[in-house]
Amino acid sequence: MLSNNVYIIGAGETKYGELWDKSLRNLAVEAGLKAIENAGIYSKDIDAIYGANGLAGTINEQENIGALIADFSGLSNEGIPSIRVEASTASGGAALREAYLSIKSGEYNVVVVGGVEKMTDIHGSDIIEKMSSILDREWEAFYGATPAAMAAIIARKYMHDFNVEKEALAMVPVNDHLNASKNLNAQYHNKLTLKQAMDAIPVAEPLNLMDCSPVSDGAAAVVLASEEYMKRNKKEGIKIIGSAIAQDYLSVGSRDSIYTLKSTKLAAEKAFRRANVKRDDISFVELHDSFSIYALLELEDLGFVEKGKAKELVYDEIKTGGRIPVNPSGGLKAKGDPYGAVGVGQVVEAYLQLNEKAGERQIKNAKYALLHNMAGTGTSSVIHILEGY
Amino acid sequence: MTELSRIWRETEYRYNLIGYKCKNCNRTYFPPRDICPYCHRESIGKMEKFKLSGNGEITSYSIVHESSSAFKRQVPYVMALIKLNEGPVITAQIVDCDPDNVEIGKKVHMAFRKIREDGTNGIIEYGYKFKLA
């Protein structure tokens, strides 16, 4: 029989932030080595590497990321296969899923999944230009749309149709900052008051600076292993019990409903079905809240609350200890948003939480984690459900 | 510097607001696409150019303060989704008005405008924006 289960046996990440002294390759290698050490494996054990990255071609003028990662991790002599997975800001989740499938297929036993983004080597309107390439460049970005502008357009319509106050959106960064204040690897450690979140300078109205994730550098890596490997080495690990990905139209305007993340809905249905768990079983979620509005839409489209009702969750229920704790890591707003690393970084957080090693931000009795990694304005969603011991 | 051909090949659509109509199901699309996402194979060879009226209404909008380099001189500007009378929803700026007068549901029509410049020596790119009707 083919081994069916896939386990996470190690995880590591760099700090997220403006890391002026670290290059793209420094970050990738640092995270990869931490994960490998944490897993207690050696280079001879690695069957393949899947490296997630969103924008190195445009930001760092470096493609061929698979070779770069393998080479500077010192793995070129062995000829270990290493390829880049690109699915915009969902590259990390997509790489995790490709690695998961490669083990499920029976081809590999031990696979390293990395994610890296080095974004602060350019700044200001130039980085906004590069980041806008995650939209439809010819028919959205060409006319002046930015990721923030598209999120803001969605936010205004959502607030209008469901009578939601801006305050409900502001609760998302308030929660993220509170959680990140307990995460040493997070980009920001300052707590944010609701007033500060409401009064920040506008970026794309109705969204302000505190509704938008920052520009970040960072990398994360995890090691996946097959059931066969686990048995042979008498190891225990966190199990991936659900994995799914779905797509939507590239342009927001092409979708039937601009505030329904269809890719998230579809991927969630598949992932929950495969994992055979209920929404109520989930101990915490890591959401792709690159913009505050998305956290509300995601809670709805993941099925935790009806459309238009996320405002009932954001004040208290998303806190640690609430009904559905959101982003114990600090989320994209406060842990940081290094595009290709985000989805892998979510796994690192889940790995810590499910092993009860998350320190001050530990979720009590964490058993099931849901990780939601999304591309662009919702063009792809990757969902993983993990099971602890 | 952007090669002229990249701009030139889209000018027909951008200058005249030409989309496509699927002759199998009669749905209209903008921007142009070769395959109808409802009819799939049945639409091959049946997608025809279709001139849109340029009239529509505002689905939603944002006032943009932080832009990419090409739009730095235009901030703050209004970026909107506009539902055209023929059905497609288009992403475009709303101009020639005080942003405070823009509202969800207001009627707009197309205006031909300069969109952006490719640096100081590159091509000046033109296309559609929208004005309050």
Image: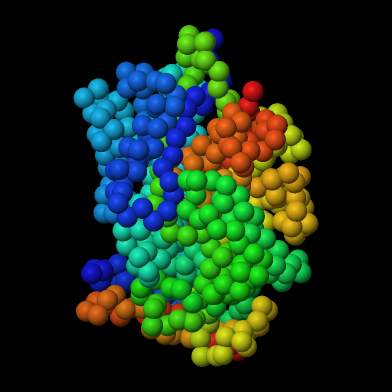
Horizontal and vertical percent position of residue A63: 28, 47
Horizontal and vertical percent position of residue B72: 39, 78
Q: Residue at x 51, y 90 (%)?
A: B96
Comparing A203 with A19, the one in front is: A19
Q: Which quadrant would residue A241 be assigned to in this image? A: top right
Q: Would residue A177 appear left or right of A224 to someone viewing this image?
A: right
Q: Would residue A269 appear left or right of B49 to someone viewing this image?
A: right
Q: Would residue A29 appear left or right of A114 to someone viewing this image?
A: left
Horizontal and vertical percent position of residue A78: 25, 22
Is A18 situated above or below A79? Answer: below
Q: Quadrant of the C terminus of chain A?
A: top right
Q: Residue at x 73, y 44 (%)?
A: A321
Q: Would residue B82 appear left or right of A315 to someone viewing this image?
A: left
Q: Residue at x 44, y 35 (%)?
A: A12
Is A239 situated above or below B131? Answer: above
Comparing A280 with B114, the one in front is: A280
Q: Is residue A327 visible?
A: yes
